[in-house]
Structures are given as structure tokens and as C-alpha cells.
């Protein structure tokens, strides 16, 4: 499971939410004026999602002179300890300067934040919920802690963190399975092909995400009948393609279809981010008639930062007449506008007619395999010694920087560690050179790579 911290100014309803999630009234009764409680961890539950929750409430009663300082220290400690912060505001009051202050703090720390607009029962809170968008943490989850409303949305917002946790377990299992072969080489486990691959389909409204998913499911339906093979939970749908299992996510398109259609359709970065975090492979869907808009670039950037494998799907290809020319332009744009995902595959398709779906699935499987790729340490260091021979790190302040050794402690995405005599002095350009070299040498062109420098002689 994971740990969440409840963050926010006094009176937004932190204790009420804490009690709602932990399911006991004890915490409230405990309040003794003037006594500062420590952060109280509780075992929280929403549906079958279990997690630890840290409350920062209880400081409201503290000595006003030191209130701010204490609250700040307490809040910082809670954020540091948690995997995700539940940032509460009062929807009836709207965003106050003190809320902004907390928002600044959360932004500086840079860890995941779920924005929660509390006291949103009835219509009174609507303006406050809209206003909360301005805090820049994506779509606020509107709840009433008091009345227990909005808990399903909170569940959906927190579910990705449970998944991240699951990922960690998978990686640890993987690490243990490495065995040493007869020549001292490391043998990594084969990909487990029985586990479904989690694929998120993200993109601007009207790119055609729902149409594609419906076409995919329609084909499945023809093969297996309306019930078999398709199970739908609130956020994903299981699908089989050539004996391989997939979980498809289309947050905006499926889960919130009803709501999205009522509202003015807009891209929610929060929704996109949630899908991206769920996913192992992200399909960014572009509309061939207006590709690479600002929001498309933002999503691609999020995918790169979250370290997921990416495939760009160019949809509505049926509408394009001069396909050769269009393709050349698309390639040029991808290279120029998305340097952070160099080598990302572009697949043209039509969700409407279904043409190109097989190509898309092929690319998904390919980048998924690369994303899981492990490079044996021996091969890595053979490559490194070649690099050091031909293009060693430069001298900085008159002293040579030495690179000694590399390993890949982790896949998903491939993450490398280089031991270096002065990591802080190694020029950025040299790090980029190493990353590009790794891509070429080990065919890792289409996935994000991480390279960390550690001090070591
Ligand atoms: P979403 O918001 O990304 O889920 O987009 P929708 O699936 O609702 O599609 C938006 C519009 O684009 C609808 O009118 C679809 O019929 C249309 N559309 C989707 N895919 C295609 C396609 O491959 N070709 C064409 N010509 N139209 C498409």
C-alpha cells in the first residue's frame, strides 16, 4: 500500500476527512486545546483501497505566535513522508492566499498532489471547485468529507499510487531472479507474457480515443460474443490481441464520458496524468488533421517525465489525401517539437475503420519489451570502456573526471548508474552523450532512459 498526507490550511476539513477515511471519531474527541499533536498516521480505507494516512490537523489550537512556523514544519514533514499529498481547500470559500501559500510549498517539493475541494455538497461549492483549477494541480476532486460524497472520485484519484506500489514489488521480484550463467554472464528473466500490459490511450478531446477503443472491443465482441473476453471495471477494460492480454485505459473517454459531454469538453491534465501513471505503455493519440498542438506536446512531456514507454498514434488517417507528404511533415514535427522522446514510433491509423490497429499493437509490444529491457553488466562495461577510450570525459578545473563502472539496477524504464569521481562536475553535454550512446548501442531508441551519476572511485 502507500502513504497519503492530508495537507491544507486550518478549517478546510482535514480532521473530518481523516475521520471519514479512517472510520473513527476518536481523533476528534482527542482534541485538547493548546496541545500540539504529532502527525497522526491512520489506516485509511476507501472501498477496497487500503493506505496509510497522515493528518496535519490539530495545529489550529496552537499558540498563534508560532502557528505558522509549526504548521510549516509539520506540513513539510508530512509531505516528505508521504507518496502523495491530498491538498484540501474549502470549495465554499474558494482559493485564499493561505491556500496559495500551501500550493507553493507543494510545488517546491515536487511530489505528487491530488487536489481536493472539500465542502462541495450541493451547488454552493461549484465556483470554488472551478477556482481550484487555478492552483495548477489539475482537476480538483470535489468531495464532502462531512457527508461522504465524492469518495468514488477520490478512490479513482488515489488508485494509481496503489499501482505504483505494485510496480515496485514486480521490480524487486525481477531483481531476485537474475542468475549467473556458465561464463559469469548475468541472465535476466524472460518477460512474463501472462501479465496483461497496461496501456493508456491519451490525447485531446475528439482525437478519437473512444472510437478506437470501441473499434477494438467491437472486433473482440465479434470473436467472443458480448460477455466473454471483456470485463470492464470503472477505469479499464481487458482486451486480448493475438493471445496477449491488455488492460486499456481511456480515463476521459470512458470513465467520465457522461460528465465530459455535459461540460465544455476540455483536456484535463489531471486525468491524463492519472492514466499515464496507470500505464506501462502510453498511446498518445493525435488528430492527423491538426497534429502536435500545444496540449499534445504537454502530454508527451508528461509521459517522458513519468518514464513510460510511448507510441504516437496519428488518427483519422482516412481523411488524409497526400499521405506521403503528411508523413514527412509529421516526422519533421516530431523531431523538432519532441526532442525529449527521440525515436518515438509514429503509427498512422483510423479508429473509425480499424485500419492500422495491428500496426499499433505491434509497436506497443515492441516498446513494452524495450522498456523492460535489461542490459547485462558485463556488456554495459565493455561498451563503457570503448567510450572512455575514444571520447573520455573532459577535464574540469584542470582535473580529469573519471568514470569507472556502470550498472543497470532497474528496468521500466531502463535506469543506469555510472560511478564517477566527481559527479557534480561532469558536464550535462557529456551525460547526454552517454545516454545517446546507450540508446544506439543497446537498441533503446524508443523509450525513456535514466542515467544517474554516483560518486565512486
Ligand atoms: P475522444 O474524445 O478522443 O474519445 O474522441 P471520439 O472518439 O469521441 O471522436 C471524436 C470525433 O472524431 C467523432 O466524431 C468520431 O466519429 C471522429 N473520429 C474518430 N476517429 C476517427 C477516424 O479514424 N477517422 C475519422 N474520419 N473520424 C474519426
Image (cartoon, rainbow, N blue to C red):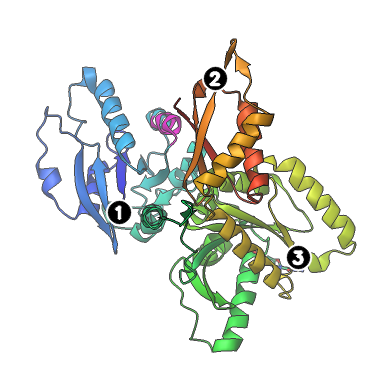
Q: Is mark 3 within 8 Å of ligand 1?
A: yes
Marks 1 and 2, how far apart at CA? 38 Å
In the image, 320 versus 150, the foreground residue is: 320
In the image, 343 versus 300, the foreground residue is: 343
Q: Main secondary structure of the magenta part?
A: helix
Marks 3 and 1, how far apart at CA? 41 Å
Vertical placement of 211 versus 343: above or below?
A: below
Q: Is residue 324 left or right of residue 339?
A: right
Q: Residue 428's spot in the image, x, y percent?
A: 61, 26
Q: Residue 179's spot in the image, x, y percent?
A: 41, 56
Residue drawn at point x = 66 percent, y = 63 percent: 363
Tag 1 near tag 2, CB within 8 Å: no
Q: Tell me which label, 1 or 2, sits earlier in the chain.
A: 1
Q: Is residue 348 visible?
A: yes
Examine the image and state in which quarter residue 219 appears.
Answer: bottom right
Residue drawn at point x = 58 percent, y = 63 percent: 261
Quarter of the image where the N terminus is located: bottom left
Q: Is mark 2 within 8 Å of ligand 1?
A: no
Q: Which residue is mark 3?
A: 316
Q: Residue 234's spot in the image, x, y percent?
A: 44, 68
**3 vs 2, front mark:** 2
Q: Which residues are magenta?
A: 102-110
Tag 3 near tag 2, CB within 8 Å: no
Q: 10 Å neighbourhood of mark 3: few (<14), some, or many (≥20)?
A: many
Determine whether the residue tagged by mark 3 lies in a helix, strand or loop: loop
Residue drawn at point x = 51 percent, y = 21 percent: 424
Q: Tell me which label, 3 or 1, sits earlier in the chain.
A: 1
Q: Which mark is residue 1?
A: 1
Q: Which residue is mark 2?
A: 425
Q: Tell me which label, 3 or 2, sits earlier in the chain.
A: 3
Amino acid at each position: 500500500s502507500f502513504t497519503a498526507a492530508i495537507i491544507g490550511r486550518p478549517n478546510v476539513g482535514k480532521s473530518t476527512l481523516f475521520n471519514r477515511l479512517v472510520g473513527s471519531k476518536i481523533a476528534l474527541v482527542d482534541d485538547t486545546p493548546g496541545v500540539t499533536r504529532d502527525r497522526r498516521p491512520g489506516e485509511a480505507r476507501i472501498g477496497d483501497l487500503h493506505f496509510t494516512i497522515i493528518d496535519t490537523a490539530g495545529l489550529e489550537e496552537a499558540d498563534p505566535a508560532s502557528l505558522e512556523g509549526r504548521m510549516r514544519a509539520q506540513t513539510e514533514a508530512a509531505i516528505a513522508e508521504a507518496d502523495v499529498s491530498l491538498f484540501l481547500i474549502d470549495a465554499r470559500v474558494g482559493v485564499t492566499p493561505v491556500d496559495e501559500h500551501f500550493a507553493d510549498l507543494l510545488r517546491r517539493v515536487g511530489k505528487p498532489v491530488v487536489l481536493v475541494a472539500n465542502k462541495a455538497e450541493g451547488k454552493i461549492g461549484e465556483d470554488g471547485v472551478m477556482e481550484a483549477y487555478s492552483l495548477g494541480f489539475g482537476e480538483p476532486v470535489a468531495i464532502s468529507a462531512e457527508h461522504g460524497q465524492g469518495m468514488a472520485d477520490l478512490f479513482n484519484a488515489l488508485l494509481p499510487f496503489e499501482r505504483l506500489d505494485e510496480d515496485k514489488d514486480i521490480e524487486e521480484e525481477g531483481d531476485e531472479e537474475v542468475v549467473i550463467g556458465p561464463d559469469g554472464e548475468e541472465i535476466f528473466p524472460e518477460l512474463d507474457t501472462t501479465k496483461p500490459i497496461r496501456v493508456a490511450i491519451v490525447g485531446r478531446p475528439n482525437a478519437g480515443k473512444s472510437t478506437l477503443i470501441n473499434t477494438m472491443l467491437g472486433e473482440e465482441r465479434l470473436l467472443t460474443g458480448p460477455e466473454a473476453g471483456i470485463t470492464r471495471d470503472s477505469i479499464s477494460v481487458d482486451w486480448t490481441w493475438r493471445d496477449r492480454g491488455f488492460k486499456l485505459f481511456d480515463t476521459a473517454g470512458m470513465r467520465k464520458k457522461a460528465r465530459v459531454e455535459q461540460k465544455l469538453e476540455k483536456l484535463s491534465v489531471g486525468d491524463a496524468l492519472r492514466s499515464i501513471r496507470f500505464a506501462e505503455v502510453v498511446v498518445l493519440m493525435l488528430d492527423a488533421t491538426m497534429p502536435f498542438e500545444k496540449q499534445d506536446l504537454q502530454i508527451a512531456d508528461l509521459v517522458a517525465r513519468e518514464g513510460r514507454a510511448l507510441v504516437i498514434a496519428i488518427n483519422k488517417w482516412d481523411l488524409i489525401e497526400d499521405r506521403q507528404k503528411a508523413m514527412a511533415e509529421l516526422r519533421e514535427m516530431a523531431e523538432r517539437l519532441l526532442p525529449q522522446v527521440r525515436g518515438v514510433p509514429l503509427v498512422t491509423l483510423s479508429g473509425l475503420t480499424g485500419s492500422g490497429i495491428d500496426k499499433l499493437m505491434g509497436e506497443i509490444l515492441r516498446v513494452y519489451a524495450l522498456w523492460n529491457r535489461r542490459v547485462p553488466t558485463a556488456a554495459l562495461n565493455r561498451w563503457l570502456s570503448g567510450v572512455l577510450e575514444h571520447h573520455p570525459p573532459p577535464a574540469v578545473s584542470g582535473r580529469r573526471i573519471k568514470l569507472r563502472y556502470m550498472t543497470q539496477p532497474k528496468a521500466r524504464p531502463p535506469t543506469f548508474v555510472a560511478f564517477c569521481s566527481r559527479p557534480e562536475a561532469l558536464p550535462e553535454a557529456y551525460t547526454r552523450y552517454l545516454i545517446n550512446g546507450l540508446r544506439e548501442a543497446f537498441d533503446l531508441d524508443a523509450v525513456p532512459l535514466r542515467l544517474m551519476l554516483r560518486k565512486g572511485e
